């Protein structure tokens, strides 16, 4: 096995200041400036996640960040109050009017996007 100090993930956005405001002010997360001119998300139980600007950014077509929650109804309601719009899907999965998918294939989950169009989710543990 190769030796490494730590591992971390990152994703791009098209506007660093919009990302800072969304992750800090809307989601209430700890966002710090990195020494490389990027942002770092500091989440409980994880190392920092790097957010970097990319002029030709293309939004991810998959979920880049999942937030485990104890009560998905409460989490969705709080985020809706903060202006988050949840995605609506019909195929291959179905979401309810709030955007929550509930089925026997996995946990209850709801998807939403950041200002750069990246897909995030809240899922019930």
Image (tube, rainbow, N blue to C red):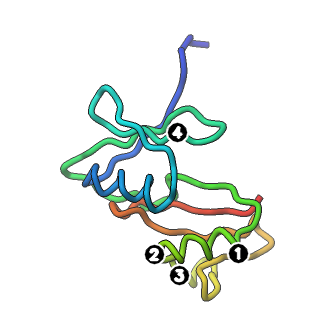
Residue receiving disc 3: 88
Is residue 96 toward the left or the right of residue 86 in the image?
A: right
Quarter of the view holding residue 2: top right
User: As displayed, is residue 87 above or below residue 37?
Assistant: below
Could you tell me how far apart the alpha carbons at marks 4 and 1 are, in whole angstroms?
24 Å
First along the sequence among labels 3 and 4: 4
- Say how many tags the image has: 4
Residue receiving disc 2: 83
Mark 4: which secondary structure?
A: strand
Q: Quadrant of the N terminus?
A: top right
Q: Quadrant of the C terminus?
A: bottom right
Mark 3: which secondary structure?
A: loop
First along the sequence among labels 4 and 2: 4
Mark 2: which secondary structure?
A: loop
Could you tell me how far apart the alpha carbons at marks 4 and 2 are, in whole angstroms?
22 Å
Could you tell me how far apart the alpha carbons at marks 3 and 4 are, in whole angstroms?
29 Å
Circles 3 and 1 in contact, beta carbons < 8 Å: no
Is residue 15 toward the left or the right of residue 65 in the image?
A: left
Residue receiving disc 4: 42
Q: Identify which residue is drawn at 36% across, 40% down.
A: 39
* Residue 101 location (% of width, % of height): 67, 76
* Residue 29 location (% of width, % of height): 51, 50
First along the sequence among labels 3 and 2: 2
The residue positioned farthest toward the right in the image shown:
104
Circles 1 and 2 in contact, beta carbons < 8 Å: no
Task: Nearest to the eye among marks 3 and 2: give it.
Answer: 2
Q: Identify which residue is drawn at 46% across, 62% down.
A: 26
Residue receiving disc 1: 73
* Residue 80 location (% of width, % of height): 53, 76
User: As displayed, is residue 11 above or below residue 114?
Assistant: above
């Amino acid at each position: 096995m190769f030796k490494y100090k730590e591992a971390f993930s990152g994703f791009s956005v098209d506007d660093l200041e919009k990302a800072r405001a969304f992750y800090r002010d809307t989601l209430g997360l700890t966002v710090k400036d990195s020494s490389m001119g990027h942002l770092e998300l500091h989440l409980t139980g994880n190392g920092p996640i790097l957010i970097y600007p990319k002029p030709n950014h293309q939004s991810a077509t998959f979920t880049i960040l999942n937030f485990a929650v104890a009560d998905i109804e409460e989490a969705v309601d709080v985020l809706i109050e903060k202006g988050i719009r949840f995605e609506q899907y019909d195929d291959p999965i179905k979401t309810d009017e709030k955007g929550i998918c509930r089925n026997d294939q996995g946990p209850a989950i709801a998807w939403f996007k950041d200002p750069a169009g990246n897909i995030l989710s809240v899922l019930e543990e």
